[in-house]
Each structure stands twice: as C-alpha cells, then as structure tokens.
Image: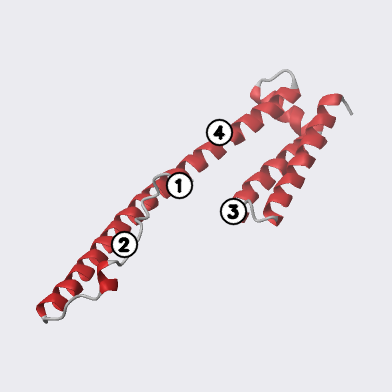
C-alpha cells in the first residue's frame, strides 16, 4: 500500500466520521449528509480498490491513477456546488415571498389597529391612556440581524 492510498483512505475515513458527528449533533441535515457519505464511500472504495482506480484512470487517459482519484473528487465537488446553488436560489425565493407576506400581515395589523382606534373615537369614548402608549411591534425586516 503506497502513501497516496493511505492518505486517501485516512481522509475518507475522517470525512465519514465528521459527517456522522455533524448529523449526530444536528448540524447537518440528513439529505445533505447522504451526499457527503456517498462521496466519502466513493473515495474510500477507490482508495482501497486500486484496480478500479487504475481502470478509471486508463479509461480517462490519465497516466497516474491517484490523479484520477482527485479528478473524481473534483467532479463530485462541482456537482455539490451546483446542488447547493440550486438550494440557495430556492431559499432566496422563499425568503423573498415570506418577507412580502410578512409586510402584508404587518400592514393588515396596522390597518386593523387604526380601525379599532377610529371606532373608539367615533363611539364617543375617549381612548384609554394605555391605547395611546401601546408599543408598536418591531418590524421583522431582518436588517442588522445575523
């Protein structure tokens, strides 16, 4: 077993352990953990089974098989980046829709409060002192939040 094979096996094993620990601590969702576990399994398989890595390198025209391992890892990272870009785009759209809905709800709440105050004045009742000093809820615009 050469040094590159040992490094790839140790790296894949560490990746497996880190992903499992992140899932255990609920820092990584299971659907994303599956992607990382699959990648670690592929690297582990290619690191352990040098004949398969040699076949992949020969098919791709790569003279040094460990370079094929890095090529496979690079392609997998590109797929992950594309997947996460799609996920971020979807979340951005959802955030925009939620912000718009929140603005509409805040406007409806403000209009209802104004309507209640108008009815109290129209009915001939003086507004209570606490009605005048009601605290407006702080808008949830997200500005300045992390």
Disc assigned to residue 145: 1
- Quick one: SS at disc 1? loop
Label located before the other in sequence (1 or 2): 2
Tell me: residue 12, above or below residue 1.
below
User: Mark 2 = which residue?
Assistant: 136
Is residue 24 found left or right of 94 in the rendered image?
right
Disc assigned to residue 98: none
Which class describes the residues within 10 Å of circle 1: few (<14), some (14-19), or many (20+)?
few
Please identify, in this view, whether the residue under mark 4 or under mark 1 is nearer the observer. 1
The span from disc 4 to disc 2 (Cα, nearest Å) is 48 Å
Which class describes the residues within 10 Å of circle 4: few (<14), some (14-19), or many (20+)?
few
Label located before the other in sequence (4 or 1): 4
> Label 2 near label 1: C-beta < 8 Å?
no
- Quick one: SS at disc 2? loop
Give residue 49's quadrant in the image: top right
Tell me: residue 122, above or below residue 29.
below
User: Mark 3 = which residue?
Assistant: 31
The span from disc 3 to disc 1 (Cα, nearest Å) is 28 Å
Label located before the other in sequence (3 or 1): 3
The span from disc 3 to disc 4 (Cα, nearest Å) is 18 Å
Q: Where is residue 64 in the image (x, y as percent from the top left)?
A: 74, 19
Label located before the other in sequence (4 or 2): 4
- Quick one: SS at disc 3? helix
Q: Where is residue 136 in the image (x, y as percent from the top left)?
A: 31, 62
User: Mark 4 = which residue?
Assistant: 78
> Label 3 near label 2: C-beta < 8 Å?
no
Residue lying furthest right: 1
Give the residue at x 30% y 67%: 134
Please identify, in this view, whether the residue under mark 4 or under mark 2 is nearer the observer. 2
Question: Which of the image's four quarters has the N terminus?
Answer: top right
> Label 1 near label 3: C-beta < 8 Å?
no
């Amino acid at each position: 077993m050469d040094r590159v094979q040992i490094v790839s096996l140790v790296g894949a094993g560490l990746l497996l352990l880190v992903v499992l620990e992140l899932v255990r601590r609920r820092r990584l969702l299971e659907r994303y953990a599956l992607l990382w576990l699959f990648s670690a399994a592929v690297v582990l398989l290619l690191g352990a089974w040098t004949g398969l890595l040699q076949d992949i390198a020969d098919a791709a025209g790569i003279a040094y098989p460990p370079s094929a391992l890095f090529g496979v890892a690079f392609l997998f990272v590109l797929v992950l980046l594309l997947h996460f870009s799609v996920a971020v785009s979807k979340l951005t759209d959802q955030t925009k829709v939620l912000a718009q809905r929140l603005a509409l709800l805040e406007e409806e709440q403000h209009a209802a409060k104004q309507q209640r105050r108008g009815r109290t004045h129209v009915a001939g009742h003086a507004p209570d002192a606490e009605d005048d000093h009601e605290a407006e809820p702080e808008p949830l615009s997200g500005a300045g939040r992390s």
